[in-house]
Image (tube, rainbow, N blue to C red):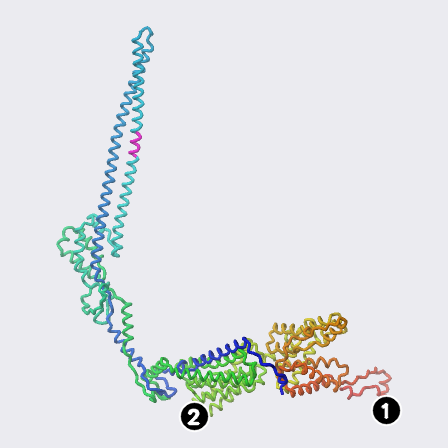
């Protein structure tokens, strides 16, 4: 009867977290099944046979179905012949002649218009300059005339002034005639002064006008120079437009001739007349690059959008020949004999205007070649079911190699979807049964998502190695043909998942995983029953001695055991299949022997990473933690020596009873060493570390209880800081369950007796949880029993036995072991074992008598015939105890 079964718990509704976890597990199951299917499906992996001419055929190649596979070599030959005779496509610009003539007429007309505008501008500029010069001459003459007139008027003024002076100097007796003359002279002076003022203004105005005309003349000269510069630029633009329009370069001499002739219409007509007949021909850039493979080309008319076949390839010319023909034609025509310079310019221009009107369209050619290659009917091998393409041991011929390659290509291009779906369903059912078997045989603790993810990784590891081997071996055997391809299959570490599953999880998990790996490997290797048996046997042996693996070297011993089972299995399978005894069988046996060491090497390499990634504490890790020089234990021994000694005794107690209740003895011993790590933060508040003073005497009971209870939380933090692993942390957290600190609870009751209030029990209970495994429950019992036994003043066999029974009964009565999985038989065995161990620890010792000092008199009495009194000397037999 199991302790946790004595209470019935009400059925609870499944929480949302559990439902979400179920969905995650289902998704993992489907994804893993699909991934394994893709890896092991025969038509989606790289297990196809590959041979070269002259290679030895490793196995019979038999046609599985009636198929027609493509003969790649013959098809490629037919395709190459068709493509070799395919005429290339050339684009013909039929409007090139018309566009050339249009550009010539446009450029000549534009040039003539520009030159006419330039001449008009120059004439107008010169006319303005001449008119301004004439105005300057006229103004200069008028100013000279006005200056001469002013000079004469100023002379008359002087005469009048002199006459006035003479009249003034005469005596007054002259009478009225003198006065009248003087008055007339004065009037004449006033008139002359007015004429002078007008003449001065006229001279000044004419001078101003002359300055303006000079400034205008300078401006007109500057404008003339600007117009000249602009005309030069416009001439350059004419040349640039000509070269840009036809994408050619015009010689300086030729352009100057055209410029001097002012691009007259006669030269334009002669240029068109010279080019007219030659531009009707089919012109390519160069005959050297024109080398069609066949006897024809295809001409695509860019205007009519038509494609026609052209076979008169001798009628096709190139630019160089057309230009040479223009030189000869110019000499023959009468109209070019008048002016050699003009003839040379027109011939040079015509040569440069010649452009190819036939250009190869490589893009369209390649496109149509691709289309043609796609439409060519392939050549087929008609293969019938059961036909033997090649037999094992033969050398591959060229035809056999081609047939095998074609068959491989056919299989890759035509996967058997029903087989694929069937494989997926088989693997899905197998993984589903695997999940159920784990739950039935190991409990729900191994069905968490993280543990299932670990199992998925372990299942994939051997398959990944198998895919790697099947990928490398074909190329390897082509280079090094020492071993047949099948020999390398026996090097695949198929037992790896089983070994790691047993070490990291449980023996049952390792066995189930070994079965799944064997099933997948047999499907991967063409449904090989013999390899299924080989994989299953090795996997079972790899999982068997999981308890004995307590150090890294044990993995190599386990590998030797795998090798020991592989060799006879391979020999027995060879007998069943009636294989001949020879080098191939010897190589298979050797590979099977090495397989165990390959498994051990890979397992020892990746085991630490898996332990760390999934927080699993294996026996090897526990051995590392059992070292008393571990930093956490060394700190505990220094800061809390009493707790350190208590932990060692608890470890011995728990280990002594572990084997009898099928618990992990190494785990309970190591966990006991660390279970009270939290006490070293305040060691003097725990009785095993106190001397004569009890620090709790000065504290309230509730505060003391909180200090005692906090050692679990503090210890858990220290354990996580030192990365002791989940197994140790779980026992550390559960080793007090949710029990009560009774001593301080009773003390609190006494403290509050006067007030009548009762203390809250929650303040005096550990946070829990209760022990979830036998190991946690065993550490709890050992801890409580060892502490209680220390309180006995005179430990005897009877008192120790009663104390052990009392503590076990109290723990059981409180329900602390309900979830640990312990039975009553386990509890009885623990009581007997603890009593036996504690009796040996607290055994009775006889008192040692005090030794008396020996004097000379005593020695003197030690003579012959003397009989000293030895009643005070101890008995040697008694002191030996």
Can you tell which mark lies on residue 383?
A: none
The image quadrant of residue 380 is bottom left
Q: Which residues are magenta?
A: 207-214
Regarding mark 2 in the picture, which secondary structure is present there? loop
Q: Residues within 10 Å of mark 2 (few under 14, many from 20)?
A: few
Residue 124 coordinates in the image, percent (x, y): 24, 40
Magenta span contains residue 874: no
Residue 585 coordinates in the image, percent (x, y): 44, 90
Dot in front, 2 or 1: 2
Can you tell which mark lies on residue 865?
A: 1
Residue in the foreground of this view, choosing between 499 and 875:
499
Magenta span contains residue 213: yes
Q: Residue furthest top?
A: 173
The image quadrant of residue 704 is bottom right
Residue 684 visible, this angle: no
Residue in the foreground of this view, choosing between 703 and 551:
703
Can you tell which mark lies on residue 577?
A: 2
Residue 340 coordinates in the image, percent (x, y): 17, 51
Q: Residues within 10 Å of mark 1 (few under 14, many from 20)?
A: few
């Amino acid at each position: 009867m199991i302790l946790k079964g004595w209470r019935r718990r009400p059925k609870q509704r499944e929480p949302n977290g559990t439902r979400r976890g179920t969905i995650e597990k289902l998704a993992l199951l489907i994804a893993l099944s699909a991934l394994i299917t893709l890896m092991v499906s025969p038509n989606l992996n790289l297990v196809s046979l590959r041979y070269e001419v002259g290679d030895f055929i490793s196995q019979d190649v038999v046609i599985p179905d009636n198929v027609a596979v493509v003969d790649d070599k013959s098809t490629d030959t037919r395709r190459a012949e068709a493509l070799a005779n395919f005429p290339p496509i050339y684009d013909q610009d039929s409007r090139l002649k018309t566009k050339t003539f249009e550009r010539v007429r446009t450029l000549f007309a534009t040039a003539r218009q520009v030159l006419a505008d330039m001449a008009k501008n120059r004439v107008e500029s010169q006319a303005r300059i001449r008119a301004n010069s004439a105005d300057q001459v006229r103004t200069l003459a008028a100013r000279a005339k006005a200056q001469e007139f002013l000079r004469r008027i100023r002379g008359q003024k002087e005469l009048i002034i002199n006459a006035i002076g003479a009249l003034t100097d005469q005596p007054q007796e002259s009478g009225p005639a003198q006065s009248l003359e003087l008055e007339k002279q004065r009037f004449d002076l006033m008139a002359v002064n007015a004429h002078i003022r007008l003449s001065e203004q006229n001279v000044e105005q004419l001078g101003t006008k002359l300055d303006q005309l000079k400034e205008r003349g300078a401006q007109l000269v500057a404008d003339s120079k600007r117009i000249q510069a602009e005309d030069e630029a416009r001439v350059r633009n004419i040349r640039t437009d000509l070269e840009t329009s036809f994408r050619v370069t015009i010689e300086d001499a030729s352009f100057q001739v055209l410029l001097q002739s002012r691009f007259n219409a006669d030269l334009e007509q002669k240029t068109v007349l010279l080019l007219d007949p030659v531009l009707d021909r089919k012109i390519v850039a160069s005959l050297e690059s024109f080398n069609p493979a066949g006897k024809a080309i295809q001409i695509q008319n860019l205007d009519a959008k038509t494609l026609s076949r052209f076979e008169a390839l001798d009628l096709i010319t190139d630019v160089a020949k057309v230009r040479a023909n223009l030189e000869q034609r110019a000499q023959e025509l009468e109209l070019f004999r008048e002016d050699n310079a003009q003839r040379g310019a027109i011939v040079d221009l015509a040569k440069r205007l010649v452009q190819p009107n036939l250009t190869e369209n490589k893009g369209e050619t390649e496109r149509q070649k691709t289309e043609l290659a796609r439409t060519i009917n392939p050549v087929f091998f008609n293969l019938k079911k059961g036909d033997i393409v090649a037999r094992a041991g033969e050398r591959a011929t060229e035809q056999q190699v081609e047939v095998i390659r074609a068959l491989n290509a056919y299989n890759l291009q035509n996967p058997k979807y029903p087989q694929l779906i069937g494989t997926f369903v088989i693997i899905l059912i197998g993984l589903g049964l695997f999940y159920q078997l784990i739950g039935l045989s190991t409990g729900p603790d191994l069905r968490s998502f993280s543990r299932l993810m670990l199992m998925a990784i372990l299942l994939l590891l051997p398959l990944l190695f198998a895919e790697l081997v099947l990928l490398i071996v074909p190329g390897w055997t082509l280079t090094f043909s020492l071993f047949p391809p099948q020999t390398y299959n026996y090097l695949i570490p198929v037992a790896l998942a089983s070994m790691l599953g047993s070490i990291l999880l449980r023996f049952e998990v390792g066995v189930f995983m070994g079965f799944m790996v064997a099933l997948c490997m047999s499907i991967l290797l063409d449904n090989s029953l013999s390899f299924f048996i080989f994989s299953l046997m090795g996997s079972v042996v790899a999982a068997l001695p999981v308890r004995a693996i307590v150090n890294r070297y044990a993995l190599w011993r386990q590998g030797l055991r795998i090798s020991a089972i592989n060799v006879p299995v391979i020999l027995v399978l060879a007998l069943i299949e009636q294989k001949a005894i020879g080098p191939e069988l010897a190589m298979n046996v050797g590979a099977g022997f090495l397989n165990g060491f390959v498994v051990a090497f890979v397992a020892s390499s990746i085991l630490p990473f898996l332990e760390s990634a999934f927080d699993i504490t294996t026996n090897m890790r526990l051995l590392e933690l059992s070292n008393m020089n571990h930093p956490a234990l060394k700190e505990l021994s220094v800061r809390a020596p009493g707790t350190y000694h208590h932990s060692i005794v608890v470890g011995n107690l728990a280990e002594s009873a572990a084997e009898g209740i099928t618990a992990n003895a190494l785990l309970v011993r190591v966990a006991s060493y660390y279970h009270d790590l939290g006490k070293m933060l305040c060691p003097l508040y725990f009785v095993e570390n106190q001397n004569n003073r009890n620090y709790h005497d000065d504290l309230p009971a509730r505060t003391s209880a909180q200090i005692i209870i906090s050692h679990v939380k503090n210890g858990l933090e220290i354990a996580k800081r030192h990365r002791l692993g989940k197994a140790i942390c779980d026992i550390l957290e559960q080793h007090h369950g949710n029990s009560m600190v009774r001593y301080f609870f009773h003390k609190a009751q006494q403290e509050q007796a006067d007030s009548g209030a009762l203390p809250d029990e929650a303040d005096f209970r550990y946070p829990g949880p209760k022990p979830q495994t036998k190991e946690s429950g065993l550490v709890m019992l050992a801890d409580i029993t060892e502490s209680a036994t220390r309180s006995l003043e005179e430990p005897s066999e009877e008192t120790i036995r009663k104390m052990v029974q009392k503590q076990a009964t109290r723990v059981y009565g409180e329900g602390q072991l309900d979830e640990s999985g312990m039975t009553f038989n386990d509890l009885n065995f623990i009581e007997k074992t603890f009593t036996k161990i504690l009796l040996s620890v607290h055994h009775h010792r006889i008192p040692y008598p005090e030794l008396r000092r020996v004097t000379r008199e005593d020695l003197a009495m030690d003579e012959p015939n003397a009989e000293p009194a030895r009643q005070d000397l101890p008995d040697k037999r008694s002191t030996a105890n």
